[in-house]
Amino acid sequence: MENVIINYLQKPDINDPILIEGLPGVGNVGKLAAEHLIDQLHAEKFADLFSKHFPPQVLVGEDGVVKLVNNELHFVKSSNKDGFDLIILVGDYQGMTPEGQYELASKILEVAREFKVKKIFTLGGYGMGKVIEYPRVLGATTNKGLVEEMRKYGITFPKGEPGSGIVGASGLLLGLGVLEGIESVCLMGETSGYFADPKAAQAVLEVLTKILNVKVDFKQLELKAKELDYMTSKLKDLETSMIESQKEDLNYFG
Amino acid sequence: MENVIINYLQKPDINDPILIEGLPGVGNVGKLAAEHLIDQLHAEKFADLFSKHFPPQVLVGEDGVVKLVNNELHFVKSSNKDGFDLIILVGDYQGMTPEGQYELASKILEVAREFKVKKIFTLGGYGMGKVIEYPRVLGATTNKGLVEEMRKYGITFPKGEPGSGIVGASGLLLGLGVLEGIESVCLMGETSGYFADPKAAQAVLEVLTKILNVKVDFKQLELKAKELDYMTSKLKDLETSMIESQKEDLNYFG
Amino acid sequence: MENVIINYLQKPDINDPILIEGLPGVGNVGKLAAEHLIDQLHAEKFADLFSKHFPPQVLVGEDGVVKLVNNELHFVKSSNKDGFDLIILVGDYQGMTPEGQYELASKILEVAREFKVKKIFTLGGYGMGKVIEYPRVLGATTNKGLVEEMRKYGITFPKGEPGSGIVGASGLLLGLGVLEGIESVCLMGETSGYFADPKAAQAVLEVLTKILNVKVDFKQLELKAKELDYMTSKLKDLETSMIESQKEDLNYFG
Amino acid sequence: MENVIINYLQKPDINDPILIEGLPGVGNVGKLAAEHLIDQLHAEKFADLFSKHFPPQVLVGEDGVVKLVNNELHFVKSSNKDGFDLIILVGDYQGMTPEGQYELASKILEVAREFKVKKIFTLGGYGMGKVIEYPRVLGATTNKGLVEEMRKYGITFPKGEPGSGIVGASGLLLGLGVLEGIESVCLMGETSGYFADPKAAQAVLEVLTKILNVKVDFKQLELKAKELDYMTSKLKDLETSMIESQKEDLNYFG
């Protein structure tokens, strides 16, 4: 079998689309954001990607029916004149090896060429190692003009961050895209990195939807974020009361 | 050398066969079941699979003669009108890397195409982490119709299980088989997962033989299961007496 | 570059040669034996094998000149009518991955075909986990006839040994050789496996030279073995005196 | 995508150039030296190497613009008659697997052939495990004549060093270069190996620039070395005072 297989369900009729990538990663920020976008814009799946660079695994649905792990391409045509047609990439896994990452990103860029994608936005999380109340959205782009353009939407470009660069599909699509002459932006929502983070996903989407000139409802993400906040605060209470109780214990020796 | 080599000893004359897979895995349930089936139905080997995705190893027989580690394809023609011709896949190893797993499953499906396999049953164990008195047989299939059909044979499809999906050949043959238009079923016998489990293998085979409309003698598996039960009960006795003895020790402080 | 490169220095004029393999492995038994054979029979190098399956490394000689790590093929023409022309395979490393092992063994067998090799002897160690005074030579072959033939030379074929089979080039050349119709024997000298073992290498060579009907001087190996015995006995003395001293310490509490 | 991609920005008009390699490695000696040479000689980039053997990563510049991790080829034409045209290889990473190392070195040698490179110098560090006041420069070459020639420049060829050979690009370019008939020298500056070592880089460059008959200013490297010396001495002071303070503590029990 080929290293990467694309199975088209249809070849959508879209014009100069923008490609959005949201695969699993830090805080699953990109995946949550892209899936929410698919849900809200009623995007339609048009292709499956299978690859020997994914785990040799099927997932089993609630109905007992299996699904080979994959990446998926969805599309949505713009509902207004000033908007953009979109291709949205989501999936169960990223490539499991460096070589796999390169081959998958390379295949995605083949699709991008075929559909004449004019810009790529990759979505991800920026791990902060602590809970973030108001996550900022950091950016990285393929040229200086885009940096200036993106600043207008409130995206920050702090010097020296991310210091270790961007690893995985969110970085490679930009880096390999340059070789194909495609300009791209990576949007990274600040996140603790400890759990799937709907708040960071919302922060990223709020910026992205402004850029794309589309409206989406954030209720579902906000609900998830509230549940998470509740659980986090409970954990903090527990932590505090444990520290208090330890202090009391120490008082015996005070 | 090619990544996967198939050496045919003969090309059997079989019609619309069903493919049964039983390779090493959790509790070696699939392997035990498939080997018992080969034994009972007097299936005949017709092909060897060698691959650089297997360990670089030969096994040494009791007579001092070596055998390169492999997978094997056996066949059996149906002895009655209402039965099915079978191809049975067994072997020493599964592919050792994700890439190897995909290439091997892909090669098996080439064989399936060539022999016009109409259905695949993959056999495996479902690890429970504790000894199971009466193992159930869990199922997963490639479509909802098959789920309903399989329920009739007592196969259970509990929601959300197996939560982590099915990894390895038993999963991939289903997942990649769908892309080839082959419908398949995975049968998983509940097992502790701690040792090769003949009881789980028998549970799987009892269901499978009903589906296939063949009769097999389970004496050998029952014997192995009894030996295992005996050993397990001895271990439990030992465990119990150790706990008792610890309780007595603690009584000194009671 | 190709995965495996063979650079011929010359194409020797040899007839129905026997191929001897002695690559690094357990106790370096095979390597020691094959290198001693090359030395004693004044075998001549005729080809280098380089491969991306070896480490990316050059060795530096005492003169400051580098050598890319490799495998080497040497040959020797028989000096008498009843003898055999030989090809001897030695080297710095075996392939570092299963895939590499298969590709290298496969390439060696291409050479074997080209030179019409009629039999292969692979040499190795059989790890015993303890020092062996009089190492036996265990065998494994590609057919029953060879087992009987080899028994005559004092080679033992104990049932169920080696239980884990034979891993690496010494096993693969047999296993893949069968697919090419080449009959082969693996000779394994018993060794502790803790250090390079000249005694086991000599045991293997004594048998092999009888089979090949050649005479070699074992002085160098015997010298190395004596040095090793001396060091081993010193270690044992040390061990004994440490145990004695501990016993004395314990007497204080006696 | 191909395993290794070379993107030429231009094809420089250079004659019988010498290739200098300075990729990341022990003490980053080679990288520091080669980058300093590029800086001082105003070498010009003429090609980028991208590869799936590098990490799947982009680096983010201070301006927010990304750069796919790569290796780079720079060139400089000689400013005097007796000098040499140079190609200088630097980069973010070496290949991450043995196979990747071989493929990358092999690709570099293709470039060397195309530009008729007549000699290769690879630069690296020789890890000593302790801080080195006056680092020597060790050498290894592809033939004895070069050893003698290099000794004249103060390069040392101590017997049996480096005992473990030379691993990575600095070794492979020599080893694979021999197969292409290119003679080469590896220069290794002694370094602790604990941090990026400008002093060792300077030692290597002082020798190399003599050989190449070019002059470079070492002020920047000397400045970096002084900063490092200062930090190292501070660490030593701290260490000493900690030992003193521990001694004092022990005096209480004196």
Image (cartoon, coloured by chain):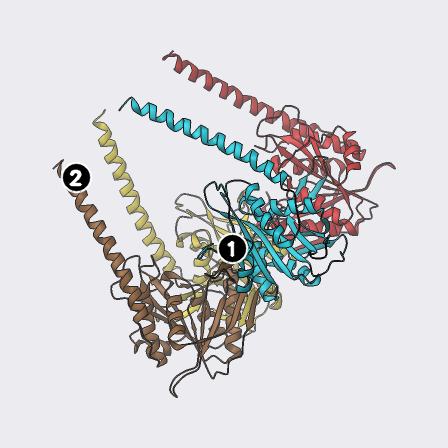
Chain colours: A cyan, B red, C yellow, D brown
Q: Position of residue D100 (x, y in %)?
A: 52, 62
Quadrant housing residue B61? top right
Q: How many marks?
A: 2
Up-down relation of residue D86 to residue B106 (above or below): below
Quadrant housing residue A86? bottom right
- Near-viewer residue (C191 or A218): A218
Identify which residue is drawn at 34% across, 52% down: C228
Instruction: Classify residue B215 as left or right of residue A184.
Output: right
* Few, some or many residues within 10 Å of mark 1 (<14, 14–19, 20+): many
Amino acid type for the residue under numbered disc 2: Asp
- Near-viewer residue (A97 or B226): A97
> Quadrant where the N terminus of chain C lies?
bottom right
Q: Do the residues labelled 2 and 1 touch (CB within 8 Å)?
A: no
Disc 2 sits on a residue from what chain? D
Instruction: Classify residue B216 as left or right of residue D170.
Output: right
Q: What element carries label 1?
A: strand
- Near-viewer residue (D120 or B132): D120
Disc 1 sits on a residue from what chain? A
Q: Mark 1 points at which residue?
A: A166
* Few, some or many residues within 10 Å of mark 2 (<14, 14–19, 20+): few
- Near-viewer residue (C196 or D69): D69
Identify which residue is drawn at 35% across, 79% down: D211
Q: Position of residue C53 (x, y in %)?
A: 52, 60
Amino acid type for the residue under numbered disc 1: Ile
Q: Mark 2 points at which residue?
A: D249
Q: Where is residue D185 in the image (x, y as percent from the top left)?
A: 39, 73
Up-down relation of residue A237 to residue D106 (above or below): above
In this orientation, does residue C78 appear?
A: no
Taking the view exactly as shown, the residue that stands out farthest to the right is: B81
Mark 2 and mark 1: Cα distance apart in space: 49 Å
Identify which residue is drawn at 52% across, 75% down: D111
Q: Can marks 2 and 1 be said to lie on one chain?
A: no
